[in-house]
Amino acid sequence: MFNARTKTITTLCGVACMAMLAIGTAACGGNGKSSDEARAMLAQAEELAGQQLYDSAVAVLDSLCRTRPAETDAVREAMFMKAVTLEKSFRAQMAQVDSIIAANVPVVESIAPHFKAVKTEEMVEGYSVHTAVAGKELINRTDIEPRIDEGGNLYIVTLLHGVAAQHDRLRVSGAAGSAETQSVPYDNSRNYRFSDDGVTNEMVTFRYDECADFARFVAEHAHEPLKLTFVGKKQHTVAMSDALKRAIAESYRYSTAMRMGMKAERDKLLLGKKIEIALRQIEQTAIEKKD
């Protein structure tokens, strides 16, 4: 469901994992037998791995390889244990990632039908808008519109019609407090102004990272009366309609679930590659251990 944009990570996964393998293998080597100290480090690493403290176990094994390179038997065993420990660690992380995906799939599936896709011939990339506010063009009226881009990211477009506030951010306020977007400075790109038959219009586009806190506040207080303020050199405040509150709240939840799910899918691809590398390393070091 979330992996539409994760295919390009495959090559990067392979490169990253091969680098990890090369570094891990190069860290160990030498000649000689195992000392009591080395055996104690191996036992410590095994105990830590048994407690699922995989990072700590790997750190002990790396320390053994780095500080006792001449103790061949211990070093080879450390290489094998490290590969086994990493494979267990990656599988544990995979289980967590699968849980994130499983938790977010029903959220996306339940909210997705409430969105309408918008794409015209002039658009390079389309977007989706909640049906509660769909069909109302953002023109000749003061309002804001939450949208979801094709990557699952929420963004908000504003139109302040007939008021010269020179706004660069939004504020939502209610009995529980308030929240603001980050500022988008006037630059005639994402913050621009124009006149239509002598009427002032100001339009600003807030990206996800700039409006997430604002949208989260609306989502948490959508059932309460809320006020929307266009903030700039002047301020202009209007009541936020129930339809707009619902649109923002569900857009935020939808975007959050999509973003978390897509990240989890990317992480799953990477972990799958890491597990493949760890399994090969287990096989290689196990053969070396028997020599």
Image (tube, grey):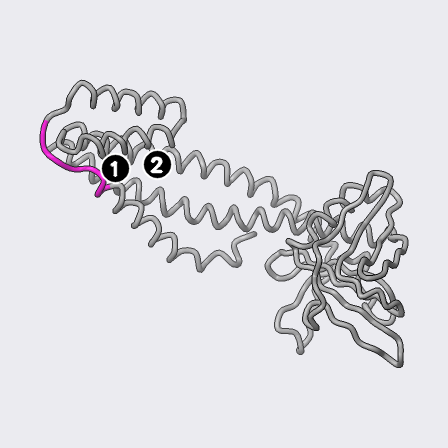
- Of 285 and 212, nearer the camera is 212
Q: Is residue 189 left or right of residue 63?
A: right
Q: Quadrant of the C terminus?
A: top left
Q: Dot 2, crowdedness within 10 Å: few (<14), some or many (≥20)? A: many
Q: Is residue 162 left or right of residue 8?
A: right
The image shows residue 155 at horizontal and vertical percentages of 69, 58
Element type at mark 1: helix
Main SS, magenta region, reads: loop
| Residue closest to the far bottom | 197
The image shows residue 157 at horizontal and vertical percentages of 74, 63
- Residue at point 13% right, 32% down? 70
Q: Is residue 28 left or right of residue 19?
A: left
Q: Quadrant of residue 11?
A: bottom left
Contact? badges 2 and 1 (CB < 8 Å):
yes
- Residue at point 33% right, 44% down? 276
Q: Which mark is residue 282?
A: 1
- Residue at point 78% right, 55% down? 170
Q: Which residue is mark 2?
A: 87
Could you tell me the amino acid type at mark 1?
Ile
Residue 55 in the magenta stretch? The answer is no
**Extent of the magenta region:** 25-32
Q: Dot 1, crowdedness within 10 Å: few (<14), some or many (≥20)? A: many
Element type at mark 2: helix
- Of 146 and 208, nearer the camera is 208
